Image: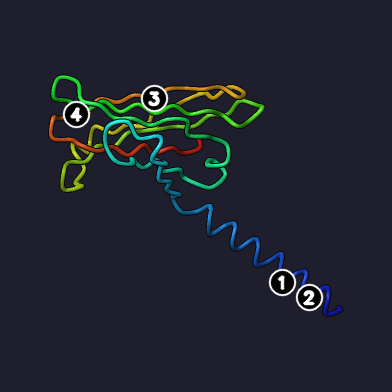
């Protein structure tokens, strides 16, 4: 086997390991300041880079309604075919501690081609100040 062939195989192996490592951890994205409405940048967490490449964050906002915070996130599919994902909102207090963790169920979404969806959540308690939206492939 020639040196060139060994280098090609090494590169392929390294690339495969790198892709596997990147796809096995949560990928966090901080929203740009232009997407903020009322408070600082909320985090959107994707389960892997493939999902991150399939979904575009259009807008994320938070506002207070009758002492409770309300989160709103608009997402757009970048795919020309439909696919399924699941999402959940997690709320945090002023100390970044989760609020009512047992209330956070995963909800399914069917994305259609180039579709835009809006996800909303109301904080479970008035002390909840920030949110995190978690997305995963189904």
| Quadrant of the image containing the N terminus | bottom right
- Callout 1: SS: helix
Q: x and y percent of residue 132 in the render?
A: 32, 39
Residue 42, image quadrant? top left
**Residue 76, above or below 21:** above
Q: Distance between the Cα atoms at labels 3 and 2?
A: 49 Å
**Could you tell me which residue is drawn at 47 percent across and 34 percent down?**
57
Q: Which residue is mark 4?
A: 124
Residue 128, by quadrant, is: top left
Where, by quadrant of the figure, is residue 133 drawn?
top left
Q: Secondary structure at mark 2?
A: helix
Contact between marks 4 and 2 (CB within 8 A): the answer is no
The residue drawn where x is 38% and y is 31% is 60
Q: Which residue appears at 27% of the width and 32% of the height?
A: 38
Q: Name the residue tied to disc 1.
A: 10
Residue at the disc numbered 2? 6
Q: Are marks 1 and 4 in contact (CB under 8 Å)?
A: no
Rate crowding at label 4 as few (under 14), some (14 to 19) or many (20 or more) other CA atoms within 10 Å: some
Q: How far is disc 4 from disc 3 in space, using C-alphas?
A: 16 Å
Residue 74 horizontal side relative to residue 132, left or right: right
* Residue position marked by numbered label 3 in the rendering: 119
Mark 1 and mark 3: span between their CA atoms?
43 Å
Q: Do residues under tags 2 and 1 come within 8 Å of each other at their CB atoms?
A: yes
Residue 94 is left or right of residue 14, and the answer is left
């Amino acid at each position: 086997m020639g040196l060139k062939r060994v280098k090609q195989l090494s590169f392929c192996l390294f690339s495969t390991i790198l892709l596997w490592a990147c796809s096995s951890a949560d990928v966090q994205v901080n929203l740009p300041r232009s997407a903020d409405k009322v408070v600082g940048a909320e985090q959107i967490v994707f389960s892997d880079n493939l999902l991150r490449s399939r979904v575009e964050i259009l807008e994320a906002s938070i506002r207070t309604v009758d002492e409770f915070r309300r989160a709103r996130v608009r997402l757009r599919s970048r795919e020309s075919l439909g696919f399924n994902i699941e999402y959940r909102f997690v709320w945090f207090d002023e100390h970044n501690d989760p609020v009512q963790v047992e209330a956070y169920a995963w909800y399914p979404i069917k994305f259609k081609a180039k579709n835009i969806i809006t996800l909303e959540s109301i904080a479970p308690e008035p002390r909840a100040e920030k949110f995190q939206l978690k997305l995963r492939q189904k």
